[in-house]
Amino acid sequence: MLVVTAVAPEAEAVGAADSGAEVLVGGVGPAAVAARTATALAGADRGSPYDLVVSAGIGGGFAPYAPIGSLVVAEAIVAADLGAGLPDGGWLAVDELGFGRTGHRPPPALAREAARLADALYAPVLTVSTVTGSAARAAELTGRHPRAGAEAMEGFGVAEAAALHGLPVLEIRAISNVVGPRDRDAWRIKDALTALTEGFRGLRPLFEGPAPERSAPERPAPPRPARPSKES
Ligand SMILES: O=C(O)c1cccc(C(=O)CC[C@H]2O[C@@H](n3cnc4c(=O)[nH]cnc43)[C@H](O)[C@@H]2O)c1
């Protein structure tokens, strides 16, 4: 398994869980992390030691579903600002424009099990290039993605690189701040990094299992809750 974080403190928090994963510091934002993840996977392609790629780190949580210090495992990894604005204030995703894609779906059985083991919310995680800084932007995002649990800046880039190499992807975010009006003093990075370590400790049985379990066949999906829910 290759775990990709944006910055070194996140990598240290993952490493502190002793999950046995190799951890790569991939940089902040989808472009930097996609380039570094793809390079790492290309270097390993011959007899690749990886069968799973995980995007991990801190993130903003959508209130009230993902409070500070909680964890979110991605049901879907969504490039939330990859598209075109419209004169009336509307917005079209690149797939609606007829090219590219704006989402990746982690293997559902694996992602659900990860959420259960980490005691995390199982919900879409948005990838943005700009940290949300206003109530209006938060409302715009929840208008387009009502079930979103978190936003961060790297998941979609990691997922694109993994897809290029035919590997499954997961994303796990520890919530450091609320998505909304910018208040940097209210970010609780230490709490989030502690939660990230705890989450990866919980995930150890999953990551230590034999490779086939990591791509467990999909079970029929239960009815979708109206709101994001914790896996139990
Ligand atoms: O200053 C520190 O000690 C420190 C330690 C760990 C991480 C950081 C970061 O600033 C990481 C940037 C990283 O965080 C994600 N993030 C966190 N909150 C949000 C958000 O509300 N919206 C979008 N992204 C968020 C993001 O993935 C950044 O790459 C600092």
Image (cartoon, helix red, strand yellow):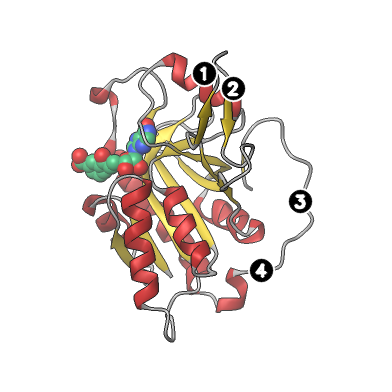
Amino acid identity at mark 2: Gly
Q: Check the image and report above or below for 196 versus 14.
A: above
Q: Nearer the viewer, residue 151 or 157?
A: 157
Look at mark 2 in the image and give the residue it sits on: 143
Amino acid identity at mark 4: Ala
Q: Which of 206 and 50 is in front in this view?
A: 50
Q: Check the image and report above or below for 25 versus 167.
A: above
Label 3 sits on a secondary structure element that is loop
The residue lying at 72 percent from left, 35 percent from top is 225
Look at mark 3 in the image and give the residue it sits on: 221
The residue lying at 42 percent from left, 85 percent from top is 46
Of circles 4 and 2, the one toward us is 2
Of circles 3 and 2, the one toward us is 2
Disc 1 and disc 2 in contact, CB within 8 angstroms: yes
Look at mark 1 in the image and give the residue it sits on: 139
Amino acid identity at mark 1: Ala
Identify the residue at the far bottom of this view. Answer: 47
Disc 4 and disc 2 in contact, CB within 8 angstroms: no
Of circles 4 and 1, the one toward us is 1
Q: Check the image and report above or below for 212 versus 29.
A: below
Indicate the quadrant containing the N terminus: top left, top right, bottom left or bottom right: bottom left
State which tag comes first along the sequence, 3 or 2: 2
Indicate the position of residue 226 as horizontal and vertical percent values.
71, 30
Q: Residues within 10 Å of mark 3 (few under 14, many from 20)?
A: few
Indicate the position of residue 201 as horizontal and vertical percent values.
41, 60
Look at mark 4 in the image and give the residue it sits on: 216
State which tag comes first along the sequence, 4 or 2: 2
The CA span between labels 3 and 1 is: 28 Å
